[in-house]
């Protein structure tokens, strides 16, 4: 790869991480101002996973996410104004304003949503992979979930079936060390999740989830394996969230020193530093480039907020849509098909 291509790759990944970071910071501000209501789970600190994993996928691949999915949706190409409108509960949101922060969804991009139920996306992802397997579709389904979901029965059932039935699914565990407020070692007797996943007969390994290049390389390798073999694969992405579990979490289960130690591994700063260390850009050039990108991203976010704020709420007469049906409608629809 030429030096120009390296610069293009590094700055592309860096820009997308900055975009997600600034979006999340704005969401925290909007939540405090009660513009965004309900639960809000931010991925600040985990941007390398979103950009490294989702950015490596083919257009035909499917993504199933968690309730901490804003970064995943943006990395998948879901328009920011559509995401922000959903956060505001507006009819123009990607889920029609019905889902909010935890239920972003965009079928046109095969982004099959966040899920407020811990591990709730795992059976969905396994089912999508089964459908592709039965129709000989070459797509891979990527399922992102947290270390807390690893303790749920849905993970073990899904992993077993995926390995047993040879399904094209890539399980990506975002291990941020805490299931809500429970530390990994207080929840799991054996904390090497990749080794445990391998017990289901699938290829599995751990990755530095704070290094976007390592995450992207591992994802590309895993995707190639799944496509070539038709077998599932598991990545344990060891990362960390700087903010509390949600905006309503007092965050009393870890120390400030611990958080500051992890901030020294910040994925955005790490990649910016690598640009300089590998003499692809000077420190001054990186600083100038970053200031320009942040200004562009802030303008994009401001426009998304303005659009969302002006968008309509779902009309009252539409509230039962997709929830209830008028007697006889189901029978009529069935006979028509």
Image (cartoon, grey):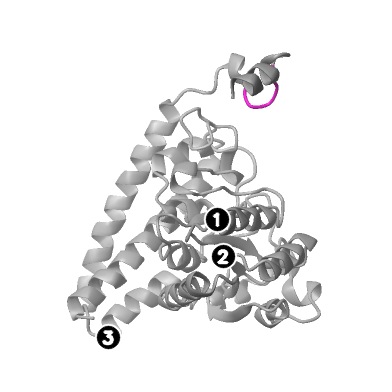
Callouts 1 and 2 close, C-beta under 8 Å: yes
Give the percent coordinates (x, y) of residue 194. 65, 79
- Label 2 packing within 10 angstroms: few (<14), some (14-19), many (20+): many
Mark found first going from the N terminus, 3 or 1: 1
Where 155 falls versus 31 (above or below)? below
Where 238 falls versus 145 (above or below)? below
Looking at the rendering, which quadrant does residue 165 occupy?
bottom right
Please state which of residues 302 and 316 is positioned toward the viewer in this rendering.
Answer: 316
Query: Image point 69% across, 55% down: which residue?
Result: 123
- Label 3 packing within 10 angstroms: few (<14), some (14-19), many (20+): few
* Disc 1 target residue: 132
Query: Image point 55% across, 42% down: which residue?
Result: 31
Disc 3/disc 2 C-alpha distance (Å): 36 Å
Disc 1/disc 2 C-alpha distance (Å): 8 Å
Instruction: Tell me: 276 left or right of 113.
Output: left
Query: What range of the chain is rendered magenta?
Result: 321-325
Local SS, label 1: helix
* Disc 3 target residue: 278
Query: Image point 63% across, 20% down: which residue?
Result: 333
* Disc 2 target residue: 168
Quadrant containing the C terminus in the rendered view: top right
Mark found first going from the N terminus, 3 or 2: 2
Please state which of residues 36 and 156 is positioned toward the viewer in this rendering.
Answer: 156
């Amino acid at each position: 790869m030429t030096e120009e291509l390296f610069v293009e790759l590094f700055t592309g990944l860096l820009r997308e991480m900055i975009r997600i970071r600034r979006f999340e910071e704005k969401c925290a501000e909007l939540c405090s101002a009660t513009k965004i209501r309900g639960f809000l789970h931010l991925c600040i600190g985990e941007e390398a996973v979103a950009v490294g994993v989702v950015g490596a996928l083919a257009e035909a691949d499917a993504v199933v996410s968690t309730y901490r999915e804003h970064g995943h949706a943006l990395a998948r190409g879901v328009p920011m104004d559509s995401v922000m409108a959903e956060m505001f509960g507006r009819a123009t949101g990607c889920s029609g304003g019905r889902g909010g922060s935890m239920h972003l969804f965009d079928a046109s991009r095969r982004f099959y949503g966040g899920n407020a139920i811990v591990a709730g996306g795992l059976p969905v992802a396994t089912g999508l992979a089964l459908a592709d397997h039965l129709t000989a579709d070459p797509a891979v389904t990527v399922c992102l979930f947290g270390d807390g979901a690893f303790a749920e029965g849905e993970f073990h059932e899904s992993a077993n079936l995926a390995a047993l039935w040879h399904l094209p699914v890539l399980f990506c565990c975002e291990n941020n060390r805490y299931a809500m407020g429970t530390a990994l070692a207080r929840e799991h007797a054996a904390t090497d999740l990749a080794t445990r996943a391998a017990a289901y007969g699938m290829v599995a390994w751990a990755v530095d989830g704070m290094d976007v290049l390592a995450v992207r390389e591992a994802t590309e390798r895993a995707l190639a394996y799944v496509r070539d073999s038709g077998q599932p694969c598991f990545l344990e992405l060891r990362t960390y969230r700087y903010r509390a579990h949600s905006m309503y979490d007092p965050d009393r289960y870890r120390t400030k020193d611990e958080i500051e130690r992890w901030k020294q591994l910040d994925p955005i700063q790490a990649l910016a530093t690598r640009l300089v260390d590998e003499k692809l850009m000077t420190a001054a050039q990186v600083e100038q480039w970053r200031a320009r990108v942040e200004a562009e991203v802030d303008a994009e976010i401001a426009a998304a907020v303005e659009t969302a704020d002006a968008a309509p709420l779902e009309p009252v007469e539409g509230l039962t849509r997709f929830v209830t049906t008028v007697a006889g409608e189901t029978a009529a629809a069935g006979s028509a098909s």
